[in-house]
Image (cartoon, rainbow, N blue to C red):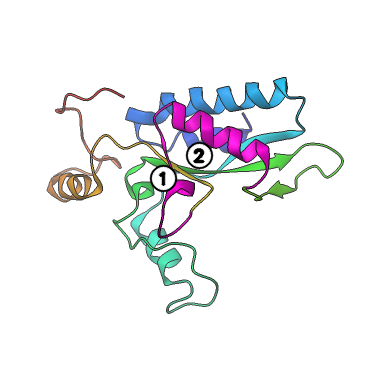
Amino acid sequence: MFEQSSERVNTLHPYIRESAVETLAMIEEDLKKRNCWYRVIVTQALRTFERQAELYARGRTAAGPRVTNARAGDSMHNYGFALDIALIDITKNKGNIIWDETRIEWRVAAQIFKQEKWTWGGDWVRFKDYPHFEKAPLPLKELRTLYAQQTTNTGYVNIDHLRLDA
């Protein structure tokens, strides 16, 4: 895994971090078996509420196209339960990021995430978010409530008291 991707994966909630590492490794292995010249990179993981507000403002009160429909606190990224990926070309065009979700490599990545019980933003009806994958132990509403009730800021929603299977 690229160093930058590892750093971003390490910002995920500990509850899903291992699943992310394993799933990304499965995708890498599949790409290698196909003799594919692309590798998966993580472009985003944990996102602060402030950064979410900036992204939400795009195309509304700030310049640029809309990139999210989620306000601050309304994204699984804000709680460390989501990541975004891209494919990077490692051939002569080294460094070029491939965003074309119609490519078979994208479909393979999505299928592997889904078989590992991640939700894919490409399956959403209202706002297709092809690079987005999330794996949350609770619905967003419950995560917001738990986050608001915390008395200490560990950076993550405390779910240790819950009995959950990853």
Q: Badges 1 and 2: C-beta atoms under 8 Å apart?
A: yes
| Front-lying residue, 19 or 157 | 19
Picture coordinates of residue 23 (x, y %)? 50, 26
Q: Where 72 sits versus 116, above or below?
A: below
Q: Earlier in the sequence, mark 1 or mark 2?
A: 2
- Looking at the rendered structure, which numbered label has been put on residue 46? 1
The amino acid beneath tag 2 is: Arg
Q: Residue at x 48, y 32 (%)?
A: 113
Q: Secondary structure at mark 1?
A: loop
Q: Which residues are magenta?
A: 102-128
**Quadrant of the image occupied by residue 40:** top right
| Front-lying residue, 31 or 57 | 31
Q: Where 69 sits versus 146, above or below?
A: below
Q: Residue at x 69, y 47 (%)?
A: 98
How packed mark 1 is, by other alpha carbons closer than 10 Å (few <14, some 14-19, many 20 or more), is many
- Looking at the rendered structure, which numbered label has been put on residue 60? none
Picture coordinates of residue 103 (x, y %)? 68, 43
Residue assigned mark 2: 8
* 125 drawn magenta: yes
Q: Is residue 42 left or right of residue 61?
A: right
